[in-house]
Amino acid sequence: MLSPIPTRPRLSTAASNRIVIVASRYNWEFVEPMVTRAVEELSAVEPGTKVEVVHAPGSFEIPFLAANVLQKSKPDAVICLGVIFKGETGHADLIAASVSDTLCRLSVEKLVPVIHGVLLLNDQEQAKERCLGAEMNRGTEAARAAVEIVRSSKALSTR
């Protein structure tokens, strides 16, 4: 059962963050709507935030590009979006576990929020529910998480 996405953070016209979205091209018909919703949400909540999108061939390559983005361009946050479908073998589980572990490690080591929106799903029906809707969209959820964690992190550094 899907739970509702978090409420929208308050509008901030003063924020001028830089957020990079690293998105998989694989399963693009489901990833692209998440990217679109994330960009729309970031623009609505923090209109002064600069958003860039970088494309990875698949979900497995997302951590590599996220690490490059963190090292070379020093964003305020990175949002990673992808869709992995479970198959008949354990391959998808291995990819998902590797991506999850690496994204978490990157965030903690670099002290930059890395939002994990790489979904491991059973089928296209689950993907439609999580990726294509306007009301329920994991791209929107990832954008809201990025805004909240960046704000919290900046508030800590000013104390």
Image (tube, rainbow, N blue to C red):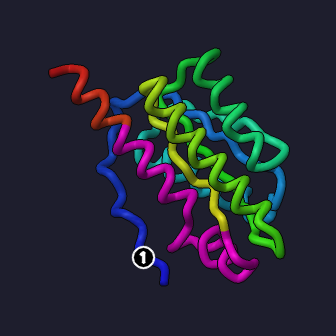
Tell which residue pokes out farthest to the left in this image.
159
Q: Main secondary structure of the magenta part?
A: helix
Residue at 48% from the left image edge and 59% from the top image edge: 141
| Relative to 29, residue 153 above or below | above
The quarter holding residue 127 reads bottom right
Give the image location of residue 148, x and y in percent. 34, 44
Q: Is residue 39 magenta?
A: no
Q: Nearer the viewer, residue 11 or 106?
A: 106
Say if residue 156 shows up in the picture.
Answer: yes
Looking at the picture, which amino acid does disc 1 mark? Answer: Ser
Query: How many numbered discs sit on the rendered protein?
Result: 1
Region of the chain picked out in magenta, as a range: 121-149
Q: Position of residue 25 (x, y in %)?
A: 82, 50
Q: Residue at x 81, y 48 (%)?
A: 58
Residue placed under numbered mark 1 in the picture: 3
SS under mark 1: loop
Query: Which residue sits at x=33%, y=39%?
Result: 12
Q: Nearer the viewer, residue 97 or 136?
A: 97
159 to 77, vertically: above or below: above
Residue 136, how many percent across, how many down?
A: 52, 72
121 or 28: which is nearer to us? 121
Quarter of the image for the C terminus: give it. Answer: top left
